[in-house]
Amino acid sequence: MRILVTGASGFLGGHLVDGALRAGHQVRALVRPTSELGRLAALPGLELAFGDLGDAASLRRAVDGVDVVQHSAARVVDFGGRARFTADNVDGTLRLLEAARAAGSSRFVFISSPSALMGPDDGDRLGIDERAPYPERWLNLYSETKAAAERLVLAANAPGFSTVALRPRGIWGPRDHAGFLPRLVARMMAGRLPDLSGGRPVLVSLCHCDNAVEAALLASVAPAERVGGRPYFVVDREETDLWAFLRRLAGLFGGTPPTRRVPAPLRTALVEAVELLWRVPALAARHEPPLSRYAVALLTRSATYRSAAAERDLGYRPVTDQEAGLRGLLDWARPAGGDGPAFARPPTRRRTTAPTL
């Protein structure tokens, strides 16, 4: 097949490119000219399509001749206004959907997130499956706009143009410089991560990048009559005690494990104070808050997901277990030159001249 991957200069998108190339597909990556492209430019057989989700003409060029679109690009940060989130996550997805459908692509795989189902007042939720509804209100703009984009994708399912949404939870693995795991490890390396668990286990599902790639490749070829218009949770086999996992990572990388506990009332007061301050437009538009309801929810709410539907309909089975994943992460992130783990150091940005598509 000929596959277009968006977000290819990012963490998961880069792994999607690698997986599709390994599987023998022709792969095209939609990237910005200003993205860090050194690794992608060196991959044999990869075609770079320069464009932007806000530029409909570039999207039409990018999807020309493409069978499958794997759309992983999104605004995933925890700051910014509604207009920016809507433009990046909703309008950009709709623009890409329309271009792919008009170009005759047969499958659109949307990388969604369980965050699309996160409400502000949720507590612990264990064993969640696809029957869980969207909330009436969302925890933050990222959650709300991912849900809106997912709905658009699933509603676009039609004969000859099937759509699938994957919801990998807590994607982790090598080459991640800015996701939840490197951020937490960086704080532990600096001795600045308090224990927010409240003294109880916080059980979570995670998804190694290899497993997310496996699901995306399977979703690209599964029978349309079986998977079209459906969302699927995708997770590792293991359920994880999050704070025990973080303590283990601190030991592996030489950081300070989180031991200083923050009482729940103080935690709530701090979040409310920060979010009040971040109502100032100049702050909200440009800077990530040091604490947010969304971040605290991810660290304090138990949330586990079932991938039984993906196993049934896609044939999904996790290909990397947690122990193998940790060994691979350690091999990649081992300090080079004595300046800390690799995933605490963002890659050097390099411009690459845009070839003609």
Image (spheres, helix red, strand yellow):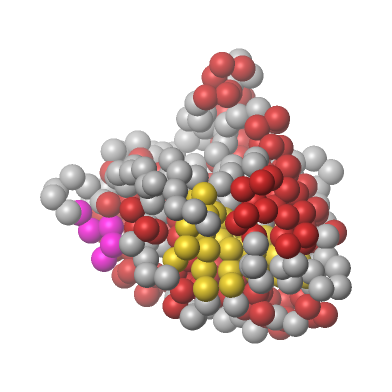
Q: Residue at x 64, y 42 (%)?
A: 55
Q: Position of residue 36 (x, y in %)?
A: 38, 47
Q: Which residue does the image show at 29% across and 38% down from the upper left?
A: 190
Say if residue 126 shows up in the picture.
Answer: no
Q: Nearer the viewer, residue 271 or 184?
A: 184
- Comparing 246 with 162, the one in front is 162
Tell me the quarter of the picture where residue 63 sits.
bottom right
The image shows residue 107 at horizontal and vertical percentages of 71, 70
Q: Is residue 18 visible?
A: yes
Dividing the image into 4 quarters, which one contains the N terminus?
bottom right
Q: Position of residue 222 (x, y in %)?
A: 70, 81
Q: Position of residue 223 (x, y in %)?
A: 75, 82
Q: Quadrant of residue 309?
A: bottom right
User: What residue is shown at x 60% (from left), y 56% (from top)?
Assistant: 62
Residue at point 65%, 62% (across, down): 64
- The boundaries of the magenta stretch are 331-335
Q: Does the magenta-highlighted stretch encompass residue 274?
A: no
Residue 30 in the figure: left or right of residue 67: left
Decide which of 281, 183 is in the foreground and name it: 281
Asked whether, in this view, residue 215 is left or right of residue 189, the answer is right
